[in-house]
Image: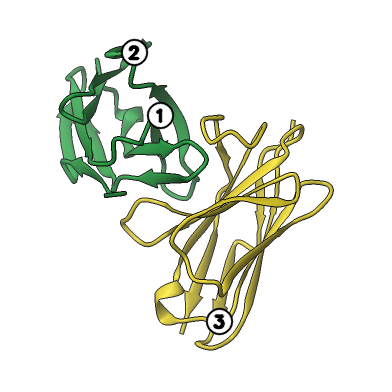
Chain colours: A green, B yellow
Amino acid sequence: QQQVKQSPQSLIVQKGGISIINCAYENTAFDYFPWYQQFPGKGPALLIAIRPDVSEKKEGRFTISFNKSAKQFSLHIMDSQPGDSATYFCAAINYGQNFVFGPGTRLSVLP
Amino acid sequence: ETGVTQSPTHLIKTRGQQVTLRCSSQSGHNTVSWYQQALGQGPQFIFQYYREEENGRGNFPPRFSGLQFPNYSSELNVNALELDDSALYLCASSISGAFTDTQYFGPGTRLTVL
């Protein structure tokens, strides 16, 4: 019940294309959903986050879409660039209790 | 402004030994969280320390313990090491004990248990 599922496991996109990564959760107690980007040899870095009372949040080329009834959320990267090539993790937070990461999506953006 | 630092970078231990990993939080942060990241997996939350007190714990056995010092730096101790403890251990600091605060991660300590 504390699990967060993430797909796809890996993704290859052409430069300028749209990258879409999906996540799903089961525990309705989760109430904060961040996305992290991790480059090899580095720790994860926060990209963007959303609360369940909002259906969409956009920051630059990054957009989170959130479907509370389906318990699903997704990250869209518009105009994907080679520099976006990294591993992306969705996460779900249960206030004061736990912080659960998805298994990750390895994104490769081809030049 | 100094970011989150961790030491050592790499560590090799044998099964049954004990290990201590260290983390210095970012300036102005009073909260440190620890995560275990197995190869090819997402980080798993171990525990969080806020103002020297444990503020939340994930599903890890008691042989994983921690400490936070008055300067808000932190240690992760693992006793009776097992082969499955081989992983990247990440430390993250944040400005308060709220789980929704932005967490700033260090580069991690790679632990190998033989």
Are the residues flagged by discs 3 and 1 from a single subunit? no
Q: Are marks 2 and 1 in contact (CB under 8 Å)?
A: no
Q: Chain of mark 2?
A: A
In this view, the mark in front (3 or 1) = 1
Are the residues flagged by discs 3 and 2 from a single subunit? no
Badge 3 density bin: few <14, some 14–19, many ≥20, Cα 10 Å:
some
Q: Amino acid at mark 2?
A: Lys
- Work out how far the residue at label 3 is from the one at label 2, CA to CA, in angstroms: 45 Å
Tell me the residue that label 1 is attached to.
Answer: A32
Q: Amino acid at mark 1?
A: Tyr
Tell me the residue that label 3 is attached to.
Answer: B13
Q: Position of residue B12 (x, y in %)?
A: 55, 77
Badge 1 density bin: few <14, some 14–19, many ≥20, Cα 10 Å:
some
Residue A111 in view: no
Secondary structure beneath dot 3 equals strand
Q: Chain of mark 3?
A: B
| Residue at image location 30% in from the left, 45% down from the top | A102
Apparent side of residue A78 relative to residue B66 in the rendered image (left or right): left
- Work out how far the residue at label 3 is from the one at label 1, CA to CA, in angstroms: 37 Å
Of the residues under marks 2 and 1, which one precedes in the sequence?
Answer: 1
Secondary structure beneath dot 2 equals strand
In this view, the mark in front (3 or 2) = 2
| Residue at image location 67% in from the left, 31% down from the top | B95
Badge 2 density bin: few <14, some 14–19, many ≥20, Cα 10 Å:
some
Image quadrant assignment for residue A61? top left
Q: Amino acid at mark 3?
A: Lys
Image quadrant in which the C terminus of chain A is located? top left
Residue farthest toward the front in the current orientation of the protein: A29
Q: Position of residue B57 (x, y in %)?
A: 53, 55
Tell me the residue that label 2 is attached to.
Answer: A57
Image quadrant assignment for residue B104? top right
